[in-house]
């Protein structure tokens, strides 16, 4: 799975960083950024939860 965040949609709610902190973090502009673009294993379920929880639907999940 490949993870990305659309910076034009992200409003900095940081739910993703709370749900999957090894994959997402909040930068100096208070926007989410991906720190692990290709997470695997058990982390994938956290990433899917984070994507579902994003109020602006800024997280995209694709095939690796």
Image: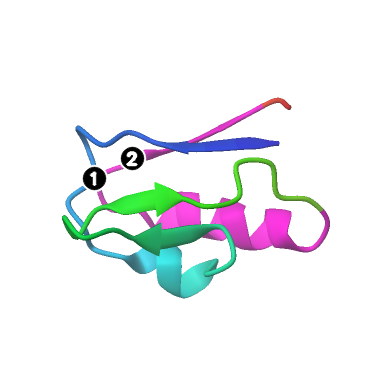
As for residue 61 lying within the magenta part, the answer is yes
- Name the residue that disc number 1 marks: 10
Kindly state the secondary structure of the residue where label 2 is placed.
loop
Residue 22 or 59: which is nearer the viewer?
A: 22
- The residue that disc 2 covers is 58
Q: Is residue 21 above or below residue 10?
A: below
Seen in the picture, residue 52 relative to 2 is either above or below; the reply is: below
Instruction: Return the residue found at the far bottom.
Output: 18
Q: Which residues are magenta?
A: 41-62
| Residue 43 position in % (x across, y down) | 71, 61
Does residue 11 belong to the magenta stretch?
no
Which residue is situated farthest in the right direction here?
41
> Of callouts 1 and 2, which one flags the residue occurring earlier in the amino acid sequence?
1
Q: Are marks 1 and 2 in contact (CB under 8 Å)?
A: yes
**Neighbour tally class for label 2: few under 14, some 14-19, many 20 plus, Cα within 10 Å:** some
Q: Residue at x 32, y 33 (%)?
A: 6
User: As displayed, is residue 34 above or below residue 13?
Assistant: above
Q: Residue at x 50, y 70 (%)?
A: 19
Q: Quadrant of the N terminus?
A: top right
Res 58 → quadrant: top left
Left or right side of 39 for 33: left
Query: Where in the figure is residue 57, as x and y percent of width and height?
Result: 33, 41
User: Is 56 or 3 nearer to us in this picture?
Assistant: 3
Front residue of this view, candidates 27 and 3: 27
Numbered circle sitting on residue 50: none
Q: Position of residue 31 (x, y in %)?
A: 24, 53
């Amino acid at each position: 799975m490949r993870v990305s965040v659309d910076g034009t949609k992200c409003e900095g709610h940081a739910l993703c960083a709370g749900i999957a902190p090894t994959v997402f973090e909040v930068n100096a502009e208070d926007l989410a950024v991906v720190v692990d673009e290709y997470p695997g294993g058990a982390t994938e379920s956290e990433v899917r939860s984070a994507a579902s929880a994003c109020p602006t639907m800024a997280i995209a999940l694709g095939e690796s």
